Structure formats: C-alpha cells, structure tokens
Image (tube, helix red, strand yellow):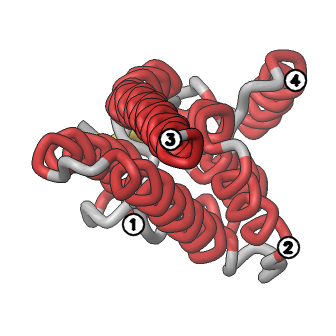
Amino acid sequence: MKQTLYDFIGVGRYAADAEVKAAILKKANVQKESGTANQFDISLLKQASEILLNPDKRRSYDRSMEEGAAQAVSTNVAQSWVVNYGVLLLCFPIAIACGITLLTAVVMMPAFKIPLIVGLYSVMTATTGILAALETSKNKARDDGDDSKSFVIFLGALIVWPIFLPIYFSRRSEQGFPRQTKSALIAVVLTVFNFGYPLYVAAKQQKELELRVDQARQRSSEIYKKSYEETMRQLNDLGTN
C-alpha cells in the first residue's frame, strides 16, 4: 500500500489550495512540537510544499498519479537511507562473543586466554565502530558530506561500546531507520556476558595458578633451607669429632 503526498498531509486529492496550505502548516507544526520527525518526514513535507503549493507542479503531479507513477512513499518503511548495516551491528558482536566462549574452552592456559579475550574485544569494537561510521557517512553524504560525525561515532564505539550501541540505534531514526534500542540493549547484554564471564574465569584461574606457583616456590625454598641447615649441621658435627 502506497501513500501519496496528499495522504501524507491528510487531505484529498481535490482539496482546495487553501486547504492544502493549511494542512501543510498543521503538519509542520505537529513535527515541530513533537520533536520526533525524522529526516524522511521532513523531506516529504518539503516535497509537499514545493509540489502541492505550486499550481503547475501540482497539475503535473496529479497527472503522474493518473498514469500510475506518482511520487509515492511506503507507509511502512521509510527508505531514506542508502546502506543498512543494522543486522551486522547487532549480530557481529554476539557472534564474536560466542566464539570467545568456545575458544576459551579450548585454550587451557589462562595466560593466553586473557590476551585473546581482550584482543578480540578490541577487534569487535573497532569493527562495529567502522560499520556504524560507514553507515552514517554513506547515508549522510548526500546531505552535507561532513565526515566528522562518523569519526566521533567510530571513537565512541571503540572507547565505550556498551554505552555507544544503544545510543546509536536510538538515533538511527535520523537516517530513516526505525528505532531498535531494545534490540541493541539485548545485544549489549549478551555480548558483555559472553566476553565478561570467560574473562572473569580466566583471571580467576590465572590468580589461582600464580598462588600455586608461589606456594611451590615457598615449599621449595623451605626444603632448600632445611637441606642447607642439615648439611651445615653435619659439617659441624664432623668438625667437632
């Protein structure tokens, strides 16, 4: 089901010019007061103003509707974007985190587990940061071509990924995407758990290993000390005799 510019502003095709103008102003006021209008809605309102308030353009638009080629938009999906990396941004961190769980189960040495977990976490945050930066850059390129925002997004993912992901998904509506904050929060919880728990276990194992090594060194030192004292005592006994 498609909606036309008339549907978007809430009037019929044969509405008078004054009625069309009033509907456009009303729509603009609603967007301004709600503060939730995305780039796609703003673009549609601009099209409605340029086309429906211009008699010649409106007649041309009406003819195109009759020919079945109206400038229409989907009522369900606002595809004002060029690329969509949403699935990768949500699934890639979880996949890497699950891989960590398997790898740490195979790697036995705690000293190798901790660098492995930290290294793959860094790879995960950098990759998601690059994906988010590319998505923003490509979808915004036709507007201003400013890549500074993309760079800030990359740094945000790299430094504070658990906080970054839900915020980024809550603001993707500016690119024409639906809000997916809950999905991002679920992805963060799963990823942090699958990274954090193996890291906790590895750190605990490392600490226990270091404790056993210290105890072994202490026992070895005590044995050496006793052996040394016994040897010295025997030498003293020989000297006395």
Return the residue nearer the eye: 23 or 101: 101
Q: Position of residue 53 (x, y in %)?
A: 77, 52
- Front disc: 2 or 4: 2
In the image shown, does 25 or 205 lie closer to the viewer? 205
Image mark count: 4
How far is disc 3 from disc 4 in space, using C-alphas?
A: 112 Å
- Asked whether disc 2 touches disc 1, contact meaning CB atoms under 8 Å apart, the reply is no
Going by the numbered disc 4, the residue's amino acid type is Asn
Residue 172 spot, x, y in % from top left: 59, 44
Amino acid at the residue labelled 2: Ser
Q: Which residue is mark 3?
A: 241
User: Do the numbered discs 3 and 1 sit on residues whose CB atoms are within 8 Å?
Assistant: no
Q: Earlier in the sequence, mark 3 or mark 1?
A: 1
Identify the residue at image location x=59%, y=31%: 166
Dot 4 crowding, Cα within 10 Å, few <14, some 14–19, many 20+: few
Percent x, y for residue 189?
43, 22
State the residue position of label 2. 148
Q: CA distance from mark 2 to mark 4?
A: 31 Å
Give the residue at mark 1: 64
First in sequence: mark 2 vs mark 1 = 1
Q: Nearer the viewer, mark 2 or mark 3?
A: 3
Q: Residues within 10 Å of mark 2 (few under 14, many from 20)?
A: few
Q: Amino acid at mark 1?
A: Ser
